[in-house]
Image: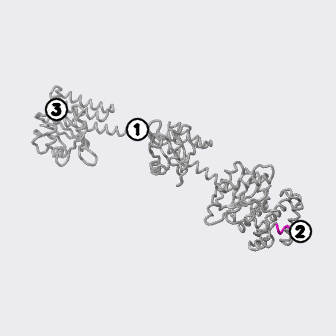
Amino acid sequence: MSVSVSTEREVGGGSYREAIEAFRDVALALRENTDRDELLHLCARKMCELVGVERASLYLREEGSGLYRGQVGHPGSAKDPLIKRLVGGVAADGFTQEIVKTRKPVVIRDALHDPRAVRSTMRNWNVRSMMGVPMMLRDEVIGLFFLDSEEKIRNFDPLDEEVASAFAELAAVAISQAEMMAALRSSHDAVARKNQALRQAAAVDDRFTGLVISGGSLREIADAVTELTGNPCAIFDPELHVLAAVADDGGLGRLGELTADPELKAAVAAVKPASPSVIGPFPRLGIPRRLLITPVRARDTDWAVLVLVEQNGRFRDYDLLISRRVAGIIALEMSAERRAAAAEWNARSSLAGQLVRGSSDIAALERRADYLGLSLDTPHALCLVGARGEGTPELLDAELIERALGETLPGISLLSTGTVEGIALIVELPEAPSKVAAIARLKEAVEATCARYDPDGHLVVAISSGCLGAGDFVRAYEQARQVLSCVDAYCPPGAAPVLGADDLGPGRVLVSDAGPEEMLRFAEETVGPLIAPDAPPELLQTVICFFESGRSIRRTARVLEVHENTIRYRLAKIQELVGFDIGTDSDAQLSVQVALLVLRLQGRLA
């Protein structure tokens, strides 16, 4: 653009000095990083002042479409929303197309009758004369100025076009620079936010990793999450039973009780794996605030659920960051604990297997037991667990059975291992005045555990006599196998689910090794007359009491509260019925005791 040296020459209602000042103002605004809309308004205002028109609107090219979208207007910004609805360069807009094609200012003297203009727009905006000026940058039209004086005919001369073109090129550079600076600032802000997020993530990792390393509990983790976010936190298992919660949990403790509600159930089911999701609120269920739910998941396994209550304002990205980080830390910690527990359980199970099978190196077994924190010098017993009936193998889960018995007898040491018969449990005997009392207490605990763990009565348990030392468990295992064999052969389903070796006595050796049919026939031949329907019941009662009283006539009479001669009379009567003297003949006594044992196992005797 050529400019005369006379600074007072009038140019389009202004002066060269005004043009220089306009360029200076735009450059200054650019240097001061003026807001984009403010810069666009400044350009529109300066253009009006330079050309001497009343109105100007500024359009910028849309990426992709090649059309030009209205941005701002002058005077004022009240009409900006209307300007932003306008688009230049459409098929009917020959005016804009000519500007873009020629890359030069285009003037319309009578906009209401010129076919190049969109006449409806001209009428709506009361436009008579208009000049369109391209904003050129690197030989591309990046925007447009439209200048007019509302409802007035205006003659735009070549000097107006020249000044407008020069200022439009400056405006194009300024706007391009402003947009580039805005993009840089946005990028810088994004990087700053990412850096801040990384610093926060590192702080969160340090905090919770420190908790894990120091052996912090889930409750301590929940407390730390609440402290960092200001929102109450609770940790649940996958079935939404509370594992840990802060003291003031915002009602989270009841969440597991409410999962049957269809609305809450559907909301929880919609939560994506390993992704924090916001659900609620559920005022009807007494949950008046939203919940941030984050599944704790690792290696396709659901370990827990982390839940925050929206109490300290709306949830932020920071809350989501902490939830994700903590969920990952909890998953790693719980999976590591599970692996450690499994490794320890396998080591204990291996020791139990060696104790049951026996080893020539007893000292090595004792060292392994000491390493696992077990004292084999304290009294123990061996429980052999089997299952009877269809579809029962799933009951024989060593880990579950060990845990169930441990809940009944807290504080005692337990080892378990699989055997051919089922599960062998090496159990520390509970404290009691005597070994017999300790075995009886263990039997009660096992019966209670079976009733709770297996209410349908499929399990049967054989308990050995007491063991003291690593070398006793092979014998105890054989005792329990004999008892279990007797139960399998003679006891009907549901009868005598728990029997001890001391309950059966030495007769279990004979009964367990003989065929069931042969032993049943032997029992019938031996004491059949005493169990016949017409036999006097006091005779069988006397026989049982006689053996339980150490074959002493005096003690038997005292227990039955009869005279000693009555016992002698009954023993003589028994001899007449069965054919042998159980009062003095040791062979007869053994035969009767074995026969009574078989009948007891069958449930035919109390």
- Residue 549 seen anywhere in this rendered image of the structure: yes
Residue that mark 1 sits on: 189
Which of the numbered marks, if any, corresponds to residue 156?
none
For the residue carrying disc 3, how many other residues have a C-alpha within 10 Å: few (<14), some (14-19), or many (20+)?
A: some
Question: What residue is at 61 percent from the left and 50 percent from the top?
Answer: 337
Q: Which residue is mark 2?
A: 585
The reply to whether the magenta stretch includes residue 591 is yes
Q: Amino acid at mark 3?
A: Val
| Of the image marks 3 and 2, the number of the one nearer the N terminus | 3
Frontmost residue, 76 versus 219: 219
Horizontal side of residue 376 vs 262, given as left or right: right
Q: Is residue 264 left or right of residue 334?
A: left
Whichever of labels 2 and 1 marks the residue nearer the N terminus, that label is 1
At mark 2, the secondary structure is: loop
Q: Which residues are magenta?
A: 583-592
SS at badge 1: helix
Q: Is residue 209 left or right of residue 437?
A: left
Residue with the mark numbered 3: 53
Q: Picture coordinates of residue 454 (x, y %)?
A: 64, 58
Check whether the beta carbons of the residues at disc 3 and disc 2 lie within 8 A of each other.
Answer: no
Name the quadrant containing residue 55.
top left
Residue at the location (47% across, 35% down)?
312
In the image, residue 123 above or below residue 22: below
Would you place residue 150 above or below residue 427 in this image?
above
Q: Where is the C terminus found, in terms of image quarters?
A: bottom right
Q: Say what secondary structure mark 3 lies in.
A: loop
Q: Is residue 203 visible?
A: no
Establish if 300 lies above or below 41: below
**Mark 2 surroundings within 10 Å by alpha-carbon count, few (fewer than 14), some (14 through 19), many (20 or more):** few
Q: For the stretch drawn in magenta, what is the main secondary structure?
A: helix
